[in-house]
Image (cartoon, rainbow, N blue to C red):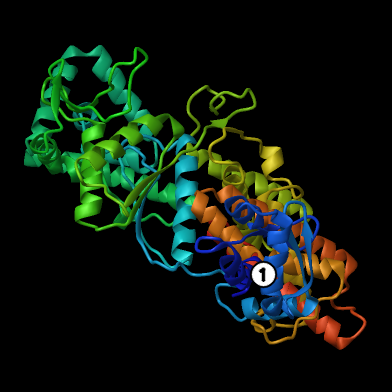
Amino acid sequence: MADPLVTVAELLAPAFAAVGGSGAEPVVRPSDRADAQANGALAIAKRLGQNPREVAETVLAAARPALLGVCSSVDIAGPGFLNLTFTNEFLAGQLTVAAADEHLGVRPARRVEHVVIDYSHPNVAKEMHVGHLRTTVIGDSLVRMLEFLGHRVTKENHIGDWGTPFGMLIEHMLDLGETTAASELSVGDLAGFYQGARAKFDADDVFKDRARQRVVELQRGDPETLRLWRILVAESTRYFNEVYHKLGVLLTDDDLAPESMYNPMLPVVVERLREAGLVQESDGAQVVFPPGYTNRDGEPLPLIVQNSVGGYNYATTDLACVVDRVERLNVDRMVYVVGAPQAQHLAMVFAVAEMAGWLAPPREAVHVAFGNVLGADRKMLKSRSGESLKLGELLDEAVERAGAAIAEKNPDLSGPERAAVARAIGIGAVKYADLSTDRIKDYVFDWDRMLAFDGNTAPYLQYAHARLCSIFRRAGIDRRGIAAGGSPFVVCEVQERNLALRLLAFDTAVWDTVDRYSPHRLCTYLFDLAQDFTAFYEYCPVLKADDDATRQSRLALCGITVRVLEKGLDLLGIIAPERM
């Protein structure tokens, strides 16, 4: 164990239980008045009808033997709060434990789960635009963190590759010629291809009839139509992969879970709902009424699983996804990284899945909702021409802008190294601007702010990392050797204590982020860590320390700081350059 808050909570737990009985537990948090504050005496006092400060005194008396060597002082404040100040020796010992741990003191999951994360969701033959940014980077960071905690994670990229638009897309491809169409798609001009098909569909009745007939052929499994459809899917997938490579996310072709994959399951899903007595007819459609959902008039709100002409829709496919993930993958948790406007739809899907017995505790489904990316006008971010901003073009511009900033800041970097650093900073800036915002909220896309080398930005954190690496280069020391706990820690100065406490809070930061599915919490922690390091570095000389023991200790502090910063950025999917 390395996090002092977790350690002291475990040390206090027996005393709280002895005084308050079963279920009485301390809640330990950071404090402005001390290193930590333990709450819980007030709840015990209310239950027992006693004075909370007297309860706190009894708890403290029982806990004192366990706190010897851990706390230099414990004071009772307010309605029974315990304010705890840790000894410097205890902090140094906890740093040694964290430095020797490849997970840097972060506790692994007690119960390993199989988690499916559903994210990204582009559509075949359509451009990935800025609207895909949030689902992709939030989902990717959650994958990284859950795997870091030891969970088994299955990534599912639920792409749209089925439905009526594919009739017009296939016919448009035939009109262009397969070779020409494939070439157009392979260079990423999916928007032009789709718009050309749509314009022809809207203007030409003959083409429209051909497209509709092609949909029929696709749905009945005509081999030639399926071959043409596969060309569209393959070329679009190649384009998606190029964007994912630019963005630096973990998704691959192995993670594709297209709509077409669930198509054979749709009639089975409806039949199983019918056999369970859940399906009703409403205006000719087959629907399920999950309890608690009503429209504006207070009438029950249906989840349509089959429309009046026998077709299936997104709700049917989403239910098929649940069935597949439960019965084939045997998952414990399903995490849907989907925009906030889909909240009611997903809640109704989950409710129907529960009614059908497919989703039962302890298995759970979680909607990780997020807001929008806005322009300076606080409207949906668009290109200069007023169209949806292509994600690939946005990422290219980020790298270009970062390259200009790096050329000005450090002109001595070689061409290849400058290009690599520009990519790390540009892509990192875009990701961090998104992840550092509370995902529920909208945020304004601002190039100047996100690429700034000060403030809560990726470049600021990346520069702190590079600065740390430079200390070891100047010392002629391999930082990986000293960072593994080989040097003793000595904590004396206030800035050393602050940095130590922040480093040891990495465990809590990661767990808090995962528990809330909120990457901005880890971003805030890393920003605070970088600020604490800056204060330490400015006040506490490292290479010019007064004596060798202090020098070695401060190098060790730098060593674990660079590891935590690097791992924290990695959990966000952001590269930490060693030179900038």
Q: Is residue 318 above or below residue 460?
A: above
Residue 174, position in %: x, y? 19, 31
Q: Is residue 203 above or below residue 523?
A: above
Residue 545, position in %: x, y? 89, 79
Q: Residue at x 25, y 33 (%)?
A: 315
Q: Which quarter of the picture shows residue 44?
A: bottom right
- Which residue is nearer to you in this view: 224 or 569? 569
Q: Is residue 435 above or below residue 160?
A: below
Q: Residue at x 6, y 35 (%)?
A: 220
Q: Quadrant of the image for the C terminus?
A: bottom right
Q: Amino acid at mark 1?
A: Pro
The crowd level at tag 1 (other Cα within 10 Å; few <14, some 14-19, many 20+) is many
Q: Using residue 269 as the reference point, say whether residue 172 is left or right of it.
A: right
Q: Quadrant of the image for the N terminus?
A: bottom right
Q: Which residue is mark 1?
A: 4
Q: Secondary structure at mark 1?
A: helix
- Which residue is nearer to you in this view: 221 or 514? 514
- Which residue is nearer to you in this view: 449 or 492? 492
Q: How many marks?
A: 1
Q: Using residue 573 as the reference point, say whether residue 236 is left or right of it.
A: left
